[in-house]
Image (cartoon, grey):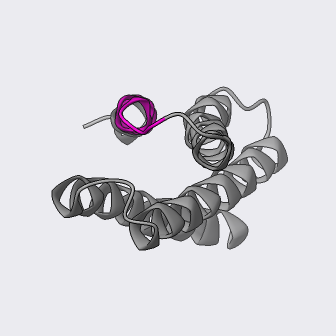
């Protein structure tokens, strides 16, 4: 199994899921700020993970992976805020938070392993 391809697809699908979920939120200044931030962080996860797979060196790979971990953690924060503000249904929040948590775990472990090389 090619884990690189698997997580390229998984991070992209997570970004799409976030974008679709945010499109259901009402339009207001407060919500627009949150929508914009979470979409930026979630799509940055996917974009930077793609960059990890195309890195020219181990140092570049590690640097990009650090960005992935930072951005998925930020996405997790925005999901917590959205949940506390009750902007999405509990069912949708479980789906989003579960996938986000899985990505946090995998990317953090991957980053740790790269740091040991």
Instruction: Residue 24: give x, y in percent of width and height.
Output: 35, 33
* Prevalent SS, magenta region: helix
Instruction: Please say if 79 is above or below 47.
Output: below
Image point (59%, 32%), residue name: 53
Q: How many marks?
A: 0
Work out whether residue 50 or residue 53 is closer to the camera in this orientation and state it.
50
Give me the residue at 39% from left, 55% from top.
87
Displayed quadrant of residue 74: bottom right
Q: Is residue 96 left or right of residue 84?
A: left
Which quadrant, please, contains the N terminus?
top left
Residue at 68%, 42% (x, y): give it: 29
Say whether residue 9 is visible: no
Whole-percent x, y for residue 33 in the image: 69, 44
| Any part of residue 45 in sight | yes
Question: Which corner quadrant of the image does residue 18 belong to?
Answer: top left
> In the image, what residue occupies the spot 40% across and 67% down?
83
Q: In x, y percent, where is residue 27? A: 53, 33
> Which quarter of the figure has residue 9?
top left
Can residue 117 be found in the magenta stretch?
no
Residue nearest the observer in this picture, 24 or 102: 24
The image quadrant where one finds the C terminus is bottom right
Name the outermost residue toward the front: 28
Percent of width and height locating residue 61:
72, 44
Residue 20's place in the image compared with 45, above or below, is: above
Between 55 and 117, the one lying in front of the other is 55
Q: Does the segment drawn in magenta span residue 22?
A: yes
Q: Viewed as shown, does residue 103 lie left or right of 57?
A: left
* Range shown magenta: 11-26
Query: Is 89 placed above or below 6 here?
Result: below
């Amino acid at each position: 199994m090619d884990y690189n391809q698997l997580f390229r697809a998984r991070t992209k699908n997570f970004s799409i899921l976030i974008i679709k979920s945010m499109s259901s939120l009402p339009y207001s200044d407060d919500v627009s700020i949150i929508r914009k931030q979470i979409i930026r962080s979630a799509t940055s996860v996917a974009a930077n993970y793609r960059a990890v797979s195309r890195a020219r060196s181990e140092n570049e790979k590690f640097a990009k992976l650090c960005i992935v971990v930072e951005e998925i953690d930020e996405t997790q924060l925005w999901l917590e805020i959205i949940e506390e503000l009750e902007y999405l249904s509990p069912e949708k929040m479980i789906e989003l938070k579960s996938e986000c948590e899985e990505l946090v775990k995998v990317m953090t472990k991957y980053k740790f392993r790269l740091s040991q090389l």
